[in-house]
Image (tube, rainbow, N blue to C red):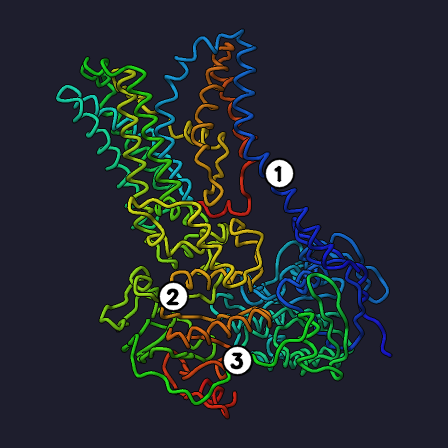
């Protein structure tokens, strides 16, 4: 058996009243890729963030190579040999690529209190070349690069000093195929050098493919550590959820005819610099999918249909001939939208579940004098939050305290309450665990059967293939192909059209 | 290893504890008001109680104009131009009071609304932060007031003194507060307002015409202060170059004393207005009756203000003042 690299001993951490981690203990070995999985809110990120000095744990110890470590911040952690690539953007605007790479370690380039910019840039250029990212220039400002490239810079930043432990928190979902391959390459390199990678991901096939062992957390409690070679996807799901997850995941039908009735017509829609000349028709009872790379412009298509795009050209027409040019008109014509940016665009975070659900339906809820009744609002919100089986104390609770999956349920409850006929769902299952995903797929299938139409924009190809009647693929802001529902369709057909 | 049931139970207890803390927090301004009132009555040997009418007389203007700023702050904005609005509207009321009293009221309200619209235009259409816009208009209209009233105060017609009665002043105040309360608590407008304060972008995506609401709020706040200007003139009979000076600070202090979170949003309560205005006036008069100098008073006010902000500031959302 190989040597132990990191001993996690009785780690606990709470945020206010929420216990995020309760006495978690397990071991991580040298030279392995160790995956950490669990549903939303199970404590994965809290654990790794405590290890990397981003949070301070409440109690317990981390023992790295036999020595206790207790980093107070990320630079501290780096010096101990721990580095992390976070889920969100981890690079800072206003600094150059080189300054970002060496953030917190500038001292190496400082002589007599003066920073030697040239030396720093030279070193950064050398590193970027080693990694094969020559197109990124060390002296450029970081904001000149897109999300993807900035993640690549973060990979360099986190790995150039050969850390003993590299934490990768949910990074692959932000990357396209090429970026992922690069990350996998670095993970393998670190493993071969005898160091350790802690890998957090929701993508179970990826976890099984990449990792050597897998630790499962549930509600902040340690469940089990298993060898990747000795378990399959269903086994992992069972450990994560705590019970058997039924086999039926996506919708099962294949040969149903979609109605000819057009409910929304999009003609020659362009948004300068993002999408150009997009035209399609949405039919009654249809689930129409949009796929592509995250930069392909597919997310803007959703906004355009909802009248939320800035500077849009072309037209979006509702079945009765109304042009949809702004959000209030869209909602009045029974169009709903859930954003990929759930916390900023879909939900009013510091607000009650009640108000979040009632917000678009206030006209319907007011009486003849245009007055609202507290009890009526509460019953309305309660009814639809419960329809979605949202986990909550009461509808007066603020949405900011809910987990990602429950937040999405509140968003959907709002539009079910509004009884919208056209739903534009952008990344509806992003960052959501298996069980809630299943609920959402079930809901979509039921809505389709009721004759509602759905536009589903997603980066997850499997769910597009599993759920949609038609899939439109976008590439560089233009439509690059359309595929009909087919039980034999596989991911590669879609990928070929995406890149 | 701890079972999940224990974790849930602890979570629940934690929530209850949080509730208690929140309850104490929300009761603090009322406790403060009662305490301050009792303390000053003891210190002034009951003098404060005997002169309650005089004290109440000072509450009206602050109380009315605080309502408008309460709306603005609920949606996350600020307004420093209230004092200048009161000054301009007071001059308009004086000038028109000779013609017709009804016209004077309408004129004051319209003048206030016009300045509010001016604020709203630059805030919403030109997308300038509200506190910058209103600091600019504060100076701009203060200039106008100085220009109009520096040589001699603008005097109102003697007829205004007919209206200097408690029923008129109290009536106007109660009406403004009553209507505003209903609008705030029981209409779409009120809920939209809170939602904008808690998260503007998401509110927009829920179909609320946020720009329109934001503009209207500034117009409304101006109009309400225009009405307060009428009460001000009824009380004083003329508008000096200093009319309404520092009203904006008084309003801000009153709201903060009343427990208003500076960043607005879902946690604001309508009681903030009434409790806060009363607390401010009682505090102010108490200190005067104690025979404190103006300098000492400002010092003490500053300290109290700081303590209240420290207690009530919602630090997580402080960065979103619009």
Q: Which mark is residue B109?
A: none
Disc 1 is placed on an element classified as helix
Alpha-carbon span between mark 2 and mark 1: 38 Å
Which residue, given by chain and number where applicable, does mark 1 sit on?
Answer: B21
Graded by Cα atoms within 10 Å as few (under 14), some (14 to 19) or many (20 or more), the crowding at tag 1 reads few
Image location of residue A353, percent across then percent down: 49, 53
Relative to B288, B213 lies left or right: left
Q: Quadrant of the N terminus of chain A?
A: bottom right
Please say whether residue B251 is visible from this viewpoint.
Answer: yes
**Which dot marks residue A336?**
2
Disc sitting over residue A250 in the figure: 3
- Residue at 65%, 54% in the rendered image: A113
Q: Chain of mark 3?
A: A
Extreme residue in the bottom direction: A488
2 or 3: tag closer to the N-terminus: 3
Q: Are marks 2 and 1 on the same chain?
A: no
How packed is label 3: few (under 14 Cα within 10 Å), some, or many (20 or more)? Answer: many
At 33% from the left edge and 62% from the top edge, which residue is drawn? Answer: A331
Q: Position of residue B190 (x, y in %)?
A: 37, 44
Q: Nearer the viewer, mark 2 or mark 3?
A: 3
Query: Mark 2 touching mark 1, by CB under 8 A?
Result: no
Q: Disc 1: which chain? A: B
In the displayed structure, A76 sits above or below A155; it is above
Mark 2 is surrounded, within 10 Å at the Cα level, by few (under 14), some (14 to 19) or many (20 or more) other residues, namely many
Query: To which chain does the residue with label 2 belong?
Result: A
């Amino acid at each position: 058996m190989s040597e132990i690299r990191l001993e996690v001993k009785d780690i606990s951490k709470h945020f206010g009243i929420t216990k995020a981690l309760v006495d978690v203990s397990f071991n991580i070995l040298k030279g392995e890729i160790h995956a950490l999985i669990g549903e939303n809110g199970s404590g994965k990120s809290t654990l790794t963030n405590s290890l990397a000095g981003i949070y301070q744990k409440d109690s317990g110890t981390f023992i790295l190579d036999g020595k206790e470590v207790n980093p107070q911040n990320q630079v501290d952690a780096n010096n101990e040999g721990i580095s992390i690539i976070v889920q969100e953007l981890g690079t800072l605007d206003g600094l150059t690529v080189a300054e970002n790479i060496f953030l917190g370690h500038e001292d190496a380039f400082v002589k007599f209190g003066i920073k030697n910019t040239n030396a720093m840039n030279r070193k950064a250029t050398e590193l970027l070349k080693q990694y094969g990212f020559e197109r990124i220039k060390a002296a450029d400002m970081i904001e000149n690069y897109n999300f993807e490239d900035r993640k690549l810079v973060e990979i360099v930043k986190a790995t150039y000093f050969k850390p003993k432990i590299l934490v990768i928190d949910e990074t692959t979902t932000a990357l396209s195929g090429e970026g992922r391959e690069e990350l996998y390459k670095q993970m393998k390199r670190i493993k071969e050098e005898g160091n350790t990678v802690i890998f957090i991901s929701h993508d179970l096939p990826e976890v099984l493919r990449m990792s050597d062992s897998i630790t499962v957390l549930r509600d902040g409690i340690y469940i089990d550590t298993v060898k990747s070679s000795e378990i399959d996807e269903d086994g992992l799901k069972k450990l994560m959820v705590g019970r058997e997850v039924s086999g039926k995941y996506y919708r099962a039908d294949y040969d149903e005819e979609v109605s000819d009735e057009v409910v929304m017509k999009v003609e020659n829609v362009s948004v300068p610099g993002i999408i150009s000349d997009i035209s399609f028709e949405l039919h009654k009872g249809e689930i129409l999918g949009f796929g592509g790379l995250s930069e392909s412009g597919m997310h803007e298509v959703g906004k355009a249909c909802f009248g939320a795009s800035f500077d849009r050209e072309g037209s979006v027409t509702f079945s009765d001939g109304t042009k949809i040019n702004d959000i209030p008109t869209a909602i009045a014509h029974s169009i709903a939208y859930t954003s990929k940016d759930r916390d900023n665009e879909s939900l009013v975070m510091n607000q009650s579940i009640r108000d979040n659900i009632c917000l678009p339906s206030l006209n319907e809820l007011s009486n003849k004098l245009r007055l609202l009744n507290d009890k009526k609002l509460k019953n309305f919100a309660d009814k639809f939050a419960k329809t979605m089986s949202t986990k909550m104390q009461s509808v007066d609770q603020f949405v900011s305290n809910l987990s990602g999956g429950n937040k999405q349920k509140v968003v959907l409850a709002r539009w079910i309450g509004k009884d919208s006929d056209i739903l534009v769902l952008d990344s509806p299952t992003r960052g959501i665990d298996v069980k809630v995903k299943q609920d959402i797929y079930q809901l979509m299938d039921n809505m389709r059967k009721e004759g509602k139409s759905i536009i589903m924009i997603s980066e997850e190809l499997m769910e597009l293939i599993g759920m949609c009647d038609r899939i439109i693929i976008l590439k560089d802001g233009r439509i690059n192909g359309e595929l009909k529902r087919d039980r034999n369709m596989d991911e590669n057909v879609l990928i070929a059209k995406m890149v | 290893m701890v079972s999940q049931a224990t974790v849930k139970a602890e979570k629940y207890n934690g929530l209850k504890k949080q509730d208690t803390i929140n309850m104490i927090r929300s009761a603090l301004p009322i406790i403060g008001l009662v305490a301050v009132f009792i303390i000053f009555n003891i210190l002034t040997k009951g003098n404060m109680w005997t002169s309650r009418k005089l004290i109440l007389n000072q509450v009206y203007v602050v109380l009315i104009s605080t309502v408008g700023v309460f709306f603005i702050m609920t949606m996350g904005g600020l307004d420093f131009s209230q004092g200048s609005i009161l000054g301009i509207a007071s001059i308009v009321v004086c000038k028109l009071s000779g013609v017709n009293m009804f016209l004077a009221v309408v004129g004051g309200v319209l003048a206030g609304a016009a300045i509010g619209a001016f604020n709203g235009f630059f805030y919403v259409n030109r997308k300038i932060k509200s506190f910058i816009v209103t600091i600019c208009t504060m100076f701009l209209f203060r200039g106008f007031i100085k220009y109009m009233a520096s040589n001699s105060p603008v005097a109102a017609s003697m007829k205004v003194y007919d209206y200097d009665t408690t029923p008129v002043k109290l009536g106007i105040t109660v009406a403004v507060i009553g209507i505003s309360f209903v609008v705030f608590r029981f209409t779409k407008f009120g809920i939209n307002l809170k939602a904008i304060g808690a998260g503007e972008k998401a509110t927009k995506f829920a179909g609320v015409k946020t720009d329109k609401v934001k503009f209207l709020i500034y117009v409304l706040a101006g109009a309400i202060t225009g009405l307060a200007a009428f009460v001000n003139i009824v009380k004083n009979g003329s508008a000096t170059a200093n009319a309404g000076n520092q009203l904006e600070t008084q309003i801000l202090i009153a709201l903060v004393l009343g427990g208003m979170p500076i960043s607005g949003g879902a946690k604001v309560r309508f009681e903030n207005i009434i409790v806060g205005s009363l607390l401010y006036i009682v505090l102010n008069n108490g200190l005067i009756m104690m025979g404190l100098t103006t300098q000492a008073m400002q010092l003490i006010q500053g300290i109290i203000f700081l303590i209240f902000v420290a207690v009530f500031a919602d630090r997580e959302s402080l960065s979103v003042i619009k």
